[in-house]
Each structure stands twice: as structure tokens, then as C-alpha cells.
Amino acid sequence: MIEICSVGGYNEVGKNCTAIKVDDEVVICDLGLHLENYTKYTGDEDVVKINPKELIRVGAVPDVTKIKDWQKKVVAIVPTHAHLDHIGAIPYLGNYFDAPIICTPFSAAVLRAILGDEKISLRNKIIELKAGSSFRVSKNIVIEFVNSTHSTPQTVMAVIHTKYGKIIYANDFKLDLFPTLGEKPDFKRLKQLGRKGVLALIVDSTYAPSPIKMPSESVAREMLKDVLLGTDAKGKAIIVTTFSSHIARIKSIVELGRRLNRKVMFLGRSLSKYTSAAESVGIVKFSKQVEIIKYSSKIKRALNKVNREGREKYLLVVTGHQGEPKSTLRKIARGEFNFKIGKEDHIIFSCKTIPSPTNIRNRKELEEQLHELGVRMFMDIHVSGHAGREDIRDLIKMTNPKHIIPAHGELKMTSALQDLALEMGYKNMNVHLMQDLDRIKID
């Protein structure tokens, strides 16, 4: 018998965690932070030492105490990629379970970096598994990783093979035919799984209400190219901010910066963390092309050097795309580094504002500060890493699951995916609209 518990990420975007019970064994897919609640509680976007019970109380991590009856049955923790809303609760909650963490090499490198930075110790063994590979966690359960695309490297769909059938956990994903880093999704394997029969598909709902095929990351690269190479910035500062985990985007920024004959500099802790992790597993080689500055004291010295040599000789990639108060961009805007930006300097936001109250407020404050300084702002130079409604339709067609479980979203998102499944001919009894901490049995 298979039972599924929607531990987190089914009422909101974030705090992702799904527990899949196969007879008397449990696989946990993802163990992530709710970044809005986490940031409110800690006052910082980075992982710090805090009592896990407090994080559960404020809704910053999944409430794993609600599956206490399954705690000793957990045989594997399987984060599908390195975003903090999927992997960020592991440092706090991993020791709650006597089970290995199975993830891709990049996710493992990011996790180890977080643990090292914060001096957190986990008992859990970290097992690295590449896309296209499988790992037997017990006599009755095999975990397979199928290559996917998303806005961070080595994102996979996890397939849980059981005697009752296969469960595909696709949370997050994008069907990018023209990725700028890594391979395109493994459509061949997904179709093979579909032909052999998939019992259930647990699937990302974030953009299910949007009737689009999500544009490729190559489109975002062209948008950046158009702004960076097509706009006169002679004698002006160029500052770009984006998601630190978006290594493909950062790679494009570096390459375009070099075409401008500007030296590229990374400024900020999270940029250092993610790019160093990517380099450690051979995804990129930024350290040979880029000056990477991690801490504020060294950032101040680096910006003094930029002032001396001339800002027109540099392209700065900085943290702060959501306007975080402690980020590098926010500090630059406040004048904390003695690096003045002003009239006609270029600030490029290669991102979208994540629509939480805190982010909306922080971005508004940052944009007002920048506007007062007279800079040129280029907004939304970005495409999402999430599947649009038509991508989700294609995934359902390829995998042909018996059951569909919409995940990763608020009710309006999961309901839109339910509507899509019904539109495609599924019956209500086979499309399961779940809320956090619901449990269902499927066969």
C-alpha cells in the first residue's frame, strides 16, 4: 500500500516536503525552507543556528512532527535540487531521521557549504547520484533521477520505483529545449516510464494558471545581451543582480561582461557559496575569469579598487535582487561602501520580484532609493525556471500517470493544475487536491 503525506508546500510556494510511504518504509522528497517566514524570523536570508522547534512554530520549515508515526520508517531524504525552498531545512531537520540524503553532486556541494558555513553537523550520510542513475535504498524501493531543467544546475525529477508502481516527483521543473548550461530534459526516459505505467505524478503547479510554454533560458540570455551590448554604458557603472543559485544566468552575464571588455566581479556571500559549489563539481570555472568577494569588509576594499581603476572597466554582479536589507546592492544604494552610483549608471535586475509582502516592500524601498540616485534601471530581464501550463500538459502526456497530485503552490495554482488534468480527461477521483499535512492512499 502507498500512502502520501503533503507535509509542506501544498498551501503556499515554499517549505516543500512530501512523504511517500511504501508499506513500512518512507521516502521524503525535498525538505525546504519557507523563505518569507524564515527571513522574518532570522532577519537574514542565510542559514543560521536556530532551534528547529522554533522554525516549525513560525512556519519556516515543514512540520515533520506531524509525521512522527513515520519518523523511524524513513529510508531516504531526496531533495531534487539546490534551492533553499527544497533543500534549506535539511540542516535543521535532517537529524530527525536516521536516513541518507540522496541528491545530485551540485545539491550535495551546496548542502555541504551551508553546513560548513554555519558549523552544523548532520548524522545523515550524503549520497551523490547523477541524473540518469538509480540507487536502491532498500529491498523494495529504488530511487531514479531523471534529468530535468530549472533555474539551478542538476535539477532532477525523482522516480520512486516500488512493487505497486512508479511515482514521479517533478517539483520544480521546466521543459527547456535550448538550455544554456547542462543537458535538455530526458524526454526519452520520461516517455519510457509513461509507456510502462506511472502510478502517480506529483507535479509543480506554480505556473499552472498561465496558458504558456515557458520560454527557454536562451531567451533570457538574449534579453541580457540586448541590454548589456545594445545600450550605451560608456563611462558608467554596470551592476547586475540575479538569483545566486542561477548558475546558467550568471554564466551568461560573465560571458557578456567579457564581450564588453569589462572585468567581472561577484560581490556577496550567497554568490560566493553557489558559484563555488558549482565550480567544485566541474559545472563552471568562474574563479579563472572572475574576482569573487564574499564578505562586506573585503567588498569595501574591492569597490575602492573599482573607484581607483574606473567603474567603466568593471561589471559588478551583486546580491540583492529582492531588495534584501543586508544585501550588497542595498548597501551600495545606501552608500555604505563609499561607492557612489548615480546619474545614468546601469542597474540590471535579471529576475522577477517574488510576490511575498516582505519582498514587495523591500524591492519598493530599493527602487525608490535607486530612483533618487538617478540611475537607469532595467527590470525583469528574466524568464522563469518553472513550467507553464502547456509544459505541464506535455509532461502529463509523456508520463501518462494514473494519479496526479498538484504541488508547489497556493490553492489557485494547484486548482488550475487540477482543472488542466480534468480538461485532459482525468476523473476527479484520480486528481488529488491536497493541503499541507493531508494524507491519501493510492493504488
Image: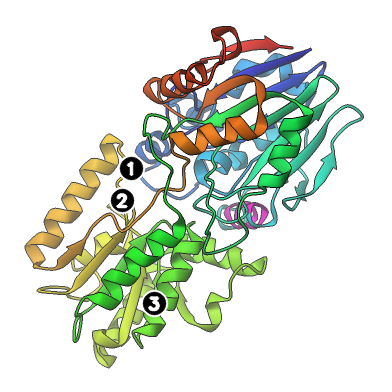
Point out the tag, 1 or 2, that comes first from the N-terminus: 2
**Which of the labelled discs sits on residue 256, or is there none?**
3
The residue drawn where x is 36% and y is 88% is: 261
The residue drawn where x is 25% and y is 84% is: 311
Amino acid marked by disc 3: Leu
Q: Are marks 1 and 2 in contact (CB under 8 Å)?
A: yes
Please give the residue where the numbered disc 2 appears in the rendered image. 322
The residue drawn where x is 46% and y is 32% is: 60
Asked whether the viewer can see residue 76, the reply is no
Amino acid marked by disc 2: Gln
Label 1 sits on a secondary structure element that is loop
Please give the residue where the numbered disc 1 appears in the rendered image. 354
**Labels in figure, total:** 3
Report the front residue among 263 and 51: 263
User: Which quadrant: the N terminus?
Assistant: top right
Amino acid marked by disc 1: Ile
Q: Residue at the far right: name it.
A: 139
Q: Residues within 10 Å of mark 1 (few under 14, many from 20)?
A: few
